[in-house]
Amino acid sequence: MENTFEPEVAQNHQSELSLGALKPIIPSGDGRVDGATERLNELTNLPAIEHVAVYEDVHRRLHDALTDNSE
C-alpha cells in the first residue's frame, strides 16, 4: 500500500489545532463568568498535562455562578 501522507497537510492540520488560533472570549458582563473564562487564556502557556486543572477550575467557577441564588 502506498503512503499518501503529506507533511504539509499534517502541518496545516496541526496549526488548526493550535491553541493560539482560538478566538477571543467575549465578555459576558458577569464578573464571575468573565473571571472564570479568563483562565482559559492561560492554556496557551501551559503544557497539556496542566490543562485539566484549568478546565476543572473554570467548570467549578461557572457552576458556582450558575447555581448561586443570592441575586
Image: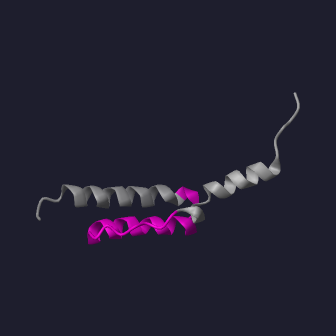
Q: Position of residue 47 (x, y in %)?
A: 58, 62
- Among the 4 quarters of the image, the one containing residue 45: bottom right
Frontmost residue, 65 versus 56: 65
Residue 67, above or below 3: below
Residue shown at 37% from the left, 60% from the top:
57
Q: Position of residue 65 (x, y in %)?
A: 24, 61
Residue 63, above or below 45: above
Q: Magenta-highlighted stretch: main secondary structure?
A: helix
Number of numbered discs visible in the structure rendering: 0
Residue shown at 50% from the left, 58% from the top:
51
Q: Does residue 41 belong to the magenta stretch? A: yes
Q: Does residue 35 belong to the magenta stretch? A: yes
- Among the 4 quarters of the image, the one containing residue 5: top right
Q: Quadrant of the C terminus?
A: bottom left
Residue 52, above or below 2: below
Left or right: 62 as drawn, with respect to 37:
left
Residue shown at 68% from the left, 54% from the top:
14
Left or right: 70 as drawn, with respect to 32:
left
- Among the 4 quarters of the image, the one containing residue 62: bottom left
Q: Which residues are magenta?
A: 23-49
Farthest residue, direction left: 70
Farthest residue, direction top: 1
